[in-house]
Image (cartoon, rainbow, N blue to C red):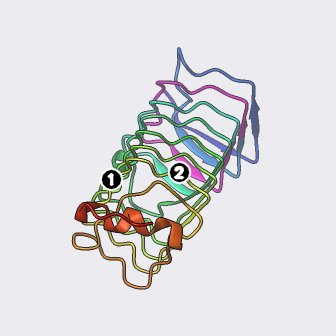
Amino acid sequence: MEKVYKEGKIFENESYEKGPLQEGEYEKCRFVHSSFYNSSFTDIVFIDCEFENCDLSMVKLNGATLNGVKFVNCKMLGIHFENSGDFGLSMTFEQCILNHASFFGKKLKKINFTECSLEEADFTECDLTSAGFFGCSLHRAVFNGTNLEKADLSSSHSYSIDPEINKIRKAKFSLNGLPGLLEKYNIIIE
């Protein structure tokens, strides 16, 4: 199949469940109210694109390039971001459902999650230096060997982060989030 180059196009009300998006490069494109459920983005390049009100659950990202990609109000269950390409990797998420997503080992410095559900997401061995988690639910999210230095979790909730196995120097937490940092000690905070 021939690779395509699309720039500045709007893809609206499309369904890619039975056939994947055509392989190629998409620059400054918008994908609106579209379904990519269980589809494949293998080796597709997205530069400065936006996905809005899309279902991207279970999308396969094998070698996909996500450079300056914005996701707004998207359902993104079970995506394995660790399979995406590392070159130019930069994303933002607003009001997305990212439950069971995996970011294992990714360098995501300064990434922002705003009002997202990240329940049971895996951030093992991620570099989240200066990341922002604004108003997010992190219930049962996994932080293991994660660099959270200078990250802002002050408005997020339901996280459990072990300071002994994660780097949290100069990270911001709220007083209400304190139990999530002390959970392993089985103490009672009133």
Inspect the magenta stretch and tell me whether residue 3 lies in it: no
* In the depicted structure, whether residue 73 falls above or below residue 156: above
Q: Residue at x 48, y 66 (%)?
A: 177
* Quarter of the image with the C terminus in it: bottom left
Q: Residues within 10 Å of mark 2 (few under 14, many from 20)?
A: many
Q: Nearer the viewer, residue 140 or 90?
A: 140
Q: Residue at x 47, y 60 (%)?
A: 89
Mark 2, secondary structure of its residue: loop
Q: Nearer the viewer, residue 102 or 175?
A: 175
Residue 178 is situated, as x and y percent measured from the top left of the image, at 43, 69
| Magenta segment boundaries in residue numbering | 31-51
Mark 1, secondary structure of its residue: loop
User: What's the distance in space between the residues labelled 1 and 2, CA to CA?
Assistant: 12 Å
Name the residue tied to disc 1. Answer: 142
56 to the left or right of 148: right
State which tag comes first along the sequence, 1 or 2: 2
- Determine the main secondary structure of the stretch shown in magenta: loop
Q: Residue furthest bottom?
A: 170
Name the residue tied to disc 2. Answer: 137
Residue 14 is situated, as x and y percent measured from the top left of the image, at 69, 23
Q: Residue at x 53, y 18 (%)?
A: 19
The amino acid on which the numbered mark 2 sits, given as a three-letter code, is Ser
Inspect the magenta stretch and tell me whether residue 41 lies in it: yes
* In the depicted structure, whether residue 80 falls above or below residue 110: above
Q: Residue at x 55, y 70 (%)?
A: 154
